[in-house]
Every structure is written in C-alpha cells, then in structure tokens.
Image: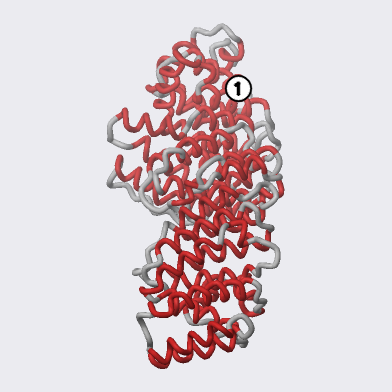
Amino acid sequence: MARFVLMVGMADLLCDTALLPTCKILLSFLKKYNLKGLVKIRKSASKFVTKILQAVDVAEISELETLAQGDASCWAESVMNSFPCCVGDEPLLIEFLLRLLSDEQLSSCRGIVINRYTNSRILVRGCVLSSTLSMLLTLVAGIQDGEELSTKVCQWLVESIGRADEDHCHVFFNALDVLAIISAKDVSIRMMNIGMSLANAMNVLPLPERSRVFRTRYVTMAQFYPKELYDVDVNRFVILASTFEQLEFFYLLAEVQREIPGSTWDAATNLLFTARLNDTRLQTFVINQLVVGIQTRSPSSLTRFKYMLDKLNCPKPDAGLLFMFCNGILSQLQGNFPHIISQLVPLWIFAVLAYSTSREMDTKRFTSLIWDDISQSLNSVEPNVCLELSPGNSELFVVKYFTVLGSSPSSTDVIRRTVAESVPISLATQVATLLKNDDKEMEERIVRVCAEMFTHVGSMLLAIAETEAQRIGLNRTSFVVLLQALVTKMVKSPMEPVFLLQVVPMYISALVKLPYRLFIYSRIKDLLFKFVDEPSIALRISGELTNRHALAYHKQLMRESDSRIKKFFGTDGST
C-alpha cells in the first residue's frame, strides 16, 4: 500500500499533462495487488475523479457511439465487462474511476460525480453523450452501494429527454434500457423503478416534434412494461399527432397482446369508419385490442364490442369488415365467452344468407369458427342431438340451428331468449335489404332458409313480436319485417316455378300453425291470390289449408266474398 501511495503522489503531479498513461499504470497496480481501503489517497483521488470526468466527457470513442445508438443489450454487456469492443485506451479511465469510487473509504468522492452533472450539463456543447453515459452506466453497474448515484442517473436521463433532439432521445432511452438490464442481472443493485422512469420520460417528450420517438418507445413499453403503460399520457399523442402519425402508431401496435389505455382505440375506430374502412392493418389493431380487452375482462371491452356490433348491424354492413371482425374475434378469443358468441350469431346468419357464394371461403371459415361454440349452446338445451355436419354448406348449419331450437324440450323461456338474440330486428332489416337485390341465387337461399326458420321457431318469433310490440310497435318487430319482406319477394318478383312449388307450401304450413292474427292472415291471402292460377302450387296450398292446424284461417277464408278466394275453394259456382 505504501508503494501505491507513493505512486499516487507522483501521479498527482503528472495527471494534468499525462492523465491516460498515469491512470493506466495506477490501474494496473491496483488490479495486480487487489488493493482496497484507499483512504490515504483521498485527496489525490478527488483530483483524479475530476480529471477523469473532464477527459471522458469529451472523449470521442467510435465503439461507444455505435453501442449507444444500437441495441441496448449490447451496450449493457459492454458496460458490465469493461468495454471489450473498444480498441483505444480511453475506457481504462472509466475502469480506473470505477475502482476508485467502488472503494468504501473513497465513497465521499462520489459526490463529485453527483455534483458535476445535471440534465443540462449532460447536453452541453462539447460533451460526448455516448462516452459520458457509458461512464455513468458503468459506475451504476459497478458500485455496490451506489443507490444515490443510480437514482440521480435516472433523473438526469428523464429530465434531459425533454430538451434533446431525436438522435439524443434515442440514446437516452437506450440508457434507461441499459439501467433496466443492469438491475435485472444484479439484484444487489437497488435503483428506482425503471418502468416508471420510462413513463415519466415519455410524458416529457415534446409532441408532435418527437412523435416518431414516442411511437417506437411506446411499443417497447407495451411489450416489457405493461403495468407502467397506464402512467404514460398516450392521449397527448393521439390529440397532437397527425393522421399519418396516428396510423403508423396503430400499425406498430397491431399485434401487441396488451390493452392500450386511453383514447387510442376510439381514435382508431374513428379513423376506420370515417376514412379508412378497407385498411386491413387498422382493422387488425381495432380487433386485436378488442380481443385483448375481452380476454382480460377489461371494463371498456363490452362497450367497445357493442360499438362494433352497432356498426355491423346496419342494413348494409361492409363485408370485409364483417369477416375481419367476426373471424378475428373467434380465431383469437381463448376461453368461454358465451355472451360474446351469442351476439355474433345474427351476423353469422346474415353472412351465410348474403355471402355463401360471393365470399364462400370467408363464410365457411366463419361457420367453422363459430360452430363449436354454437354446438355447446345447443347441447345445453338438447343434449341428445347430433350436431356434426359435413363442412362445406353453411346453409345447412343455419337450418340445423333453428331445427334444434324448435325441437328442444328445454324451458320455453330459455329457447325464446335464444331465438330473440339470434333473430333481432337488425338481422330482419338486413335480410329485407338483401331481398331488394337482383341476385337470384342469394334470394332463393334467403327464402329457403327463412322458410325453415318459420317452420321451426315461427311460434317463438310471434310470441317475441307480440311482447316487443308494446314497446316498439308490431310493424318494427323481426317477425313482421321478415314475413312482409319474404312474402313480397315471392309475390312480386319473378322466381322459378319449381322453387316456388318447394317453398310456398312451407310458408303456408308454418303460418297456419300459428295462432290467428290478422297480419298473418293478410300474408296468407297475398300468397293465395298470387298462386290461385298455378295449379300445382294451389293444390299444395289447399292441402295445407284443409289441415286441422289451419282451422281458424280456413274458416276465415271461407267467409271471404272475394271472387279469387271463392274460385280457389271452388265455391264461386264455376265448374
């Protein structure tokens, strides 16, 4: 130790003119003899610390510049291993400084570092940021009881970001990442919450000037600091960023499996529905965030889900968005969410009716994704039914769905609630809108499937309509809207006689089994008037009307004075 003290005394005289070689010799001696307890050199040590800080601040070391701008893990590895990548001797100054400040008896010298730097001092002209930060990070990593220094470094980094240009911002955030890596690898190092420091740094970024930095760092926080994400004022970015910057932000977050707080989802959906309905990347963000929220049972998830449903339950929903939304939800959602699935059933029925041909693959995928959940629901009301169907024809799955509901022995209230959820007024309106098109194949599919629906659950639809009529009026119920649209289509549009022979008797059969109601009676008359001169169809209708179930409707028809009805029943005196 005496020899070292003597050497330090000589070095004290030389450090003003030959700092690097002097420190190199002293470091070599320290390492060779592993000297500790350096209280005897405290005065000289203070001078060395000051000189080293001054030298490193202005040292341009290309390797450190590359590290500071690159991957934080590489920078951290270099910081904790004495900069093996550096070819010059300057990093030896940092290593010697660490040796001095790590000694317990020289701990008072740490105040020189703390008093030298502030956020403004780090960014002063002439200060080489990569070298200065590498030195400070090395001290944090190497000093075992340096809690005050580590806290100060975090503070300086956060405070500096608000004044830094974009390149320097990147370096400062990298330095915070290095601090996080250091603390994760050495549990003996106690420092402030790095995640909170990152959140504070995000909140002082000047916007919109540093929007690009905000975007990239926010994604990193979403991946590695999800709890602290809620401390970042993301609304500030959403409000101040341009539309282009917002879109880039949403694209970056599209696959992140964390719920993004604030108004981001609202801003994204607003862009989606006002200007970018066909933007698949924006759709992906909106749907992925919705799934994440549902999965974590976020308080806002049901509100957001309902918002999307309202957009898709319009008379003419966008097909691309419908399949992206429904197939996206069903393919990503893990777990049991019957309240979500039940609200997708009307959209599934609509998709099958509207797109089984024009978007066949999307429709088949929708059916395959939702059918397992529907099967579980159906098995709960009809345990013994076989629900395995050959893939390919989605129409058969819809028919099977209504067949099982109509034949279930379960509680009427349960089945009625399921039917009400499956055939809301929004679906009825969509079907009525579809029937105004000139797509023959689609029209026949709708008429055919709805005939099965009225056959199996017509009585429930009627009961639901009469209950809802007190609130919304009978003419705005699903039963009446559907029946009116379907009968109008069969009566007023040219359809193939063979097809009509198949479906018209099905509608008559389904309707005459229902309790007598004037609006049902009127639709039966419409069909009778249309097909009174079609012998094959008229014969089938006559057979249904003479059935015992049709007694009320048959009696009323027999009282009619209309010549067409008399002709139909052969009571007009003609031969």
Judging depth in this view, the residue of 140 and 112 nearest the camera is 112
Compared with 512, 273 (above or below) is below
Identify the residue at horizontal 61%, vertical 60% (top origin): 121
The picture places residue 296, in percent across and down from the top left corner, at 40, 48
The image position of residue 330, as x and y in percent, is: 47, 50
Q: Where is the N terminus found, in terms of image quarters?
A: bottom left
Asked if residue 352 can be seen in this view, the reply is: yes
Residue 448 point in image, percent of width and height: 54, 38
Question: Disc 1 designates what residue?
Answer: 532
Residue 197 image offset from top left, x and y in percent:
49, 55
Q: Give the residue type at disc 1.
A: Val
Residue plotted at (47% across, 32% down): 423
Q: In the rendered image, is residue 396 in sight?
A: no
Quarter residue 403 falls in: top left
Q: Secondary structure at mark 1?
A: loop
Q: Name the image quarter holding the C terminus.
A: top right
Residue name at image x 49 percent, y 88 percent: 26
Answer above or below: position of 192 versus 203: below
